[in-house]
Amino acid sequence: MVDCKQQKGGWECGYMVLQHMFDFVNLYQNQFPDEMWHDTREATDNEIDVLLMTLMPKFFSELGISLD
């Protein structure tokens, strides 16, 4: 089993899935499976906020939805 971030609450898991998908595509894809995640600390509320502020504009843009 790969060590990975896990949240104690019940609502954060979707954000962790998004973060791992983003990290895999942008950071780990070329080294996988030789390079695995070993970060088991919990994500902070600020890290979740940064993830949303980074990914959501790109997501809506791909759907043709303006955030203006």
Image: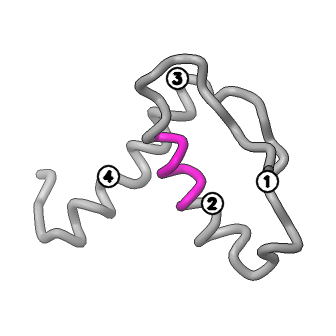
Give how far apart the Cα atoms at labels 1 and 3 are. Answer: 20 Å
Give how far apart the Cα atoms at labels 2 and 1 are. Answer: 10 Å
Locate residue 8, reporting x and y percent.
59, 18
The crowding category of the residue bearing disc 4, from other C-alpha atoms within 10 Å (few below 14, some 14 to 19, many at least 20), is few
Q: Secondary structure at mark 4?
A: helix
Give how far apart the Cα atoms at labels 4 and 3 are. Answer: 16 Å
Q: Secondary structure at mark 3?
A: helix
Q: Earlier in the sequence, mark 4 or mark 3?
A: 3
Please name the residue that numbered disc 1 is placed on.
37
Locate residue 34, reporting x and y percent.
88, 73
Query: Given this view, does label 4 or label 2 mark the residue nearer the observer?
Result: 2
Please name the residue that numbered disc 4 is placed on.
56
Amino acid beneath label 2: Asp
* 26 drawn magenta: no
Q: Earlier in the sequence, mark 4 or mark 1?
A: 1
Q: Earlier in the sequence, mark 4 or mark 2?
A: 2
- Left or right, 7 with respect to 37, comes to left
The reply to whether the C-beta atoms of the residues labelled 2 and 1 are less than 8 Å apart is: yes
Q: Secondary structure at mark 1?
A: loop
Amino acid beneath label 4: Met
Please name the residue that numbered disc 3 is placed on.
45
Query: Given this view, does label 1 or label 3 mark the residue nearer the observer?
Result: 1
